[in-house]
Image: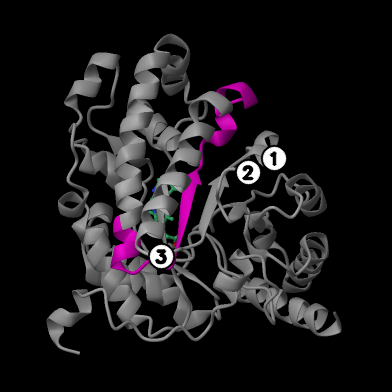
Amino acid sequence: MSKNDVFLPKDFPELKNDTFLRAARGEEPEHVPVWCMRQAGRYLPEFREIRAKKGFFDTCRSPEDCCELTLQPLRRFPFDASIIFSDILVIPQAMGMDVQMLTGKGPTFTDPLKEPEDLQRLKANVDVNKELDYVFKAITLTRHKIEGKVPLIGFTGAPWTLMSYMIEGGGSTTYSKAKRWLYRHPESSHMLLKMLTDVIVEYLLGQVAAGAQALQVFESHAGILGPVEFKEFSLPYLRDIARRVKDRLKEKGQDVPMIVFAKDAHYALEELSESHYEVVGLDWTIDPRSARERTGGKVSLQGNMDPCALYAPKELISDIVKKMLEGFGTRGYIANLGHGLYPDMDPENVAAFVDAVHQHSKLTVKKA
Ligand SMILES: Cc1c2[nH]c(c1CCC(=O)O)Cc1[nH]c(c(CCC(=O)O)c1C)Cc1[nH]c(c(CCC(=O)O)c1C)Cc1[nH]c(c(C)c1CCC(=O)O)C2
């Protein structure tokens, strides 16, 4: 392959391990597939080494760095899927907002949205192919370099989660500035959520065109909404995204599984299982058996070990995984954590988690 061909989304190596894709479609592969949210992250010394060289968003804008960071965890662990290294906040940036990643503080917006008039500051028509071209390049390059080992997942933040960052200006415990908009400016809130949805749909389609083989939508801030607000300000947009992406892919004869991860939205599990996603991702506050009952075989499930269980000794991790697998069963199930890995986690315990999923599930599938 010549130097420039690595950015052409064609002639990708053949996929060797499709356990993740089969489980996403409701099948029972020979073992339960497993990956971890934030599997590329600061818990790996080789990640910290690359990240020390430039700022966080400069790293996101380098396809070569994103590719390397995506591949790093696959060299250490037999994960069954990879997720492209990037960030959800590249969308507000593409819409014209300035966001920095400050050490010790996390994402910080220079000039957050304060009042509805501020919506005029956002770009009306975002040229996604131009503004987010660097993400598409990273995906294409990674699809080539991953050599068909495992599928590559693309992702986006969901409209409400992005809106909450754009108004709050960064992380918060209450997100009261963003929630104030929902109660005080419902029309402008819907206008912003709609603008975000339009960009997200194009962004996800661009990721598939670039080579993404599955898509995850992160509604990380679902838990700060209650059931009523979730139904008004989150769910309709999550549905719209899945519907529009699927319709447009269908026109081209394509179909990629989509995962919705609405953190702490246990109150909406039934609705989420009927929102056109093949997979519903779960945080650790939901019991596996009750999740199966409430979603009634309509979707595959992904999750949901408490990330902090990785602080346990390896034997205990294995017991916890065994119980989790008994709860979810081995059909239509993708093992993961209930949220991302933390920087102080021991890579050896991540290995123990992955091994436990493979070992326990191989025995169950064989028996059945
Ligand atoms: C809310 C959110 C963000 N980003 C993301 C979410 C949704 C998932 C979730 O709920 O955690 C999504 C995300 N961010 C990152 C990925 C890469 C893929 C992967 O999961 O390996 C993904 C999928 C890289 C990253 N994004 C970030 C890191 C760590 C910071 C670094 O590398 O310097 C990584 C690996 C930074 C980030 N970016 C964001 C936060 C809150 C932080 C943490 C800030 C901090 O801890 O200081 C916004």
Q: Residue at x 14, y 84 (%)?
A: 3
N-terminal of the two: label 3 or label 2?
3
Per the image, label 3 sits on a secondary structure element best described as loop
Which of the 4 quarters of the picture holds residue 136? bottom left
Q: Residue at x 69, y 40 (%)?
A: 270
Is residue 243 visible in the rendered image? The answer is yes
Q: Nearer the viewer, residue 322 or 152?
A: 152
N-terminal of the two: label 3 or label 1?
3
Q: What amino acid is found at the position of numbered circle 1 in the picture?
A: Glu
Instruction: Report x, y in % for residue 34.
Output: 61, 70
Q: Residue at x 42, y 23 (%)?
A: 178
Disc 2, disc 1: CB below 8 Å? yes
Q: Nearer the viewer, residue 126 or 107?
A: 126
How crowded pointer 2 is (Cα within 10 Å; few <14, some 14-19, many 20+) is rated as some
* Horizontal relation, residue 141 to residue 242: left or right: left
Total tally of numbered discs in the picture = 3
- Is residue 147 shown in magenta? no
Q: Residue at x 28, y 27 (%)?
A: 112
